[in-house]
Image (spheres, rainbow, N blue to C red):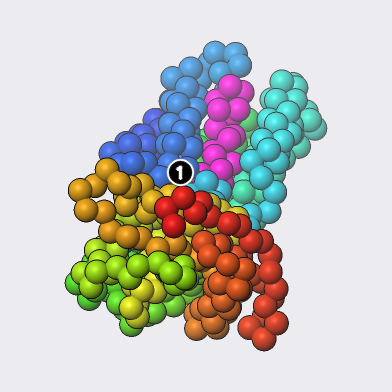
């Protein structure tokens, strides 16, 4: 009886520690919550419930097995949260594999827990299911990647691996079923506390990176062209190079576009018209581009765009939407609409490790290909700087020509 009371007291202390971690995750959740945060909260909540169940109902048949099954998923929930939080990482397997491993571990644990006390099935099934769940999650987290920003993930993997040591030591020492669960509960409560710390650290680091990126972007945007309120060439070049270095390889499209020469015999626009046209195009750009895309006005009438996390086909649709936005903005509904010439576009997918200037030269060659095919064209080009290769060419609506 005293031994049972001592075990229950230890479990209540572990449940309290786990509850503190669950409360910390609930209170520290940013708005909007990042992907994966809900799984981390579920891991802490299920751990607290499992330990409290075993502490509250020590003599109820099946309560200990239910508590062990409820305690089992936490390392896989922690892994699933990391998969979603770092969705761009090339993780081995996927969440379906995680669920399959969890089902196998639960089966091993259930078979061992339902068998009679001191049987070989219990001696192997209960520790085996717990160890498999922990080592599976720990191995994927430790091998997540080599980036410095992933060190908290590696730390969590090491903590999960260490959390499997205490119950394994209890199993090897031949402790009773209750003793094995007590060791698991204490180790898991400490590990869930570490999970809360790692989760808050990851969100803080991501917030800091975004804040630094926003500050750099605003510093560049502060040096804008007064006519179009778009960055000039030098700020754009520096910011684009940093974005290309930080984004995943081959995830950006560089596009250049310019006004087509007026058709033969067309009247020349008044001297003030070019400035109005440039402002109109700049306003249309701000309505079409996403917040993390980048645009630049340079020369007399040239524009360069860096479209992030996209591909050439989607970039061609962006060019079509821009041309349509310019056409609608210059519709005859305005009192004195500027005479807007047609636009031609050249765009390329920036290759892995490709320098910004080399990619821009290829985009200019794609624009030259578009000009060679006539007015109001979009050309996506591949190949090398010396041997450009046409990927796709589209014509734009000429009704506003």
Residue 61 falls in image quadrant: top right
Q: Viewed as shown, does residue 165 lie left or right of 201? A: right
Q: Residue at x 70, y 41 (%)?
A: 97
- Between 145 and 256, the residue placed more toward the observer is 256
Residue 396 appears in the picture as rendered = yes
Q: Viewed as shown, does residue 166 lie left or right of 16? A: right
Q: Position of residue 85 (x, y in %)?
A: 48, 49
Q: Residue at x 39, y 51 (%)?
A: 327
**Residue 131 magenta-drawn?**
no
Most frequent secondary structure within the magenta stretch: helix
Q: Residue at x 70, y 31 (%)?
A: 103
Q: Position of residue 169 (x, y in %)?
A: 62, 48
Picture layout, residue 205 above or below residue 226:
above
Q: Quadrant of the C terminus?
A: bottom left
Q: Position of residue 262 (x, y in %)?
A: 43, 69
Q: Residue at x 60, y 73 (%)?
A: 372
The span picked out in magenta is: 65-81
């Amino acid at each position: 009886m005293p031994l049972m009371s001592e075990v229950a007291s230890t479990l209540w202390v572990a449940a309290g520690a786990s509850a503190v971690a669950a409360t910390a995750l609930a209170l520290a959740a940013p708005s909007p919550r990042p992907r994966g945060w809900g799984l981390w909260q579920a891991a802490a909540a299920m751990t607290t419930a499992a330990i409290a169940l075993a502490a509250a109902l020590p003599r109820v048949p099946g309560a200990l097995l239910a508590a062990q099954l409820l305690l089992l998923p936490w390392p896989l929930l922690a892994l699933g949260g990391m998969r979603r939080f770092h969705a761009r990482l090339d993780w081995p397997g996927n969440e379906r594999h995680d669920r399959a491993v969890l089902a196998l571990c639960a089966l091993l644990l259930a078979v061992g827990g339902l068998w009679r006390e001191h049987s070989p099935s219990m001696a192997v099934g209960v520790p085996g299911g717990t160890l498999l769940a922990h080592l599976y999650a720990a191995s994927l987290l430790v091998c997540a990647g080599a980036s410095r920003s992933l060190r908290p993930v590696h730390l969590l993997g090491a903590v999960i691996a260490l959390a499997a040591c205490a119950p394994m030591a209890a199993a090897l020492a031949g402790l009773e079923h209750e003793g094995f669960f007590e060791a698991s509960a204490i180790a898991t409560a400490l590990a869930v506390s570490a999970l809360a710390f790692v989760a808050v650290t990851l969100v803080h680091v991501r917030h800091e990176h975004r804040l630094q990126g926003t500050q750099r972007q605003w510093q560049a945007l502060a040096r804008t062209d007064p006519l179009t309120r778009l960055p000039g060439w030098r700020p754009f070049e520096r910011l684009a190079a940093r974005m290309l270095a930080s984004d995943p390889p081959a995830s950006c499209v560089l596009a250049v576009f310019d006004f087509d020469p007026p058709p033969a015999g067309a009247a020349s626009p008044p001297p003030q018209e070019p400035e109005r046209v440039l402002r109109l195009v700049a306003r249309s750009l701000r309505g079409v581009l996403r917040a993390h895309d980048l645009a630049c006005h340079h020369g007399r009438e040239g524009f360069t765009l860096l479209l992030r996390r996209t591909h050439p086909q989607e970039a061609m649709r962006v060019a079509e939407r821009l041309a349509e936005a310019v056409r609608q903005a210059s519709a005859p509904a305005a009192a004195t609409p500027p005479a807007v010439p047609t636009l031609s576009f050249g765009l390329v997918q920036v290759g892995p490790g490709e320098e910004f200037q080399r990619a821009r030269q290829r985009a200019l060659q794609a624009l030259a290909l578009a000009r060679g095919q006539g007015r109001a064209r979009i050309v996506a080009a591949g190949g090398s700087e010396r041997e450009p290769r046409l990927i796709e060419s589209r014509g734009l609506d000429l009704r506003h020509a």
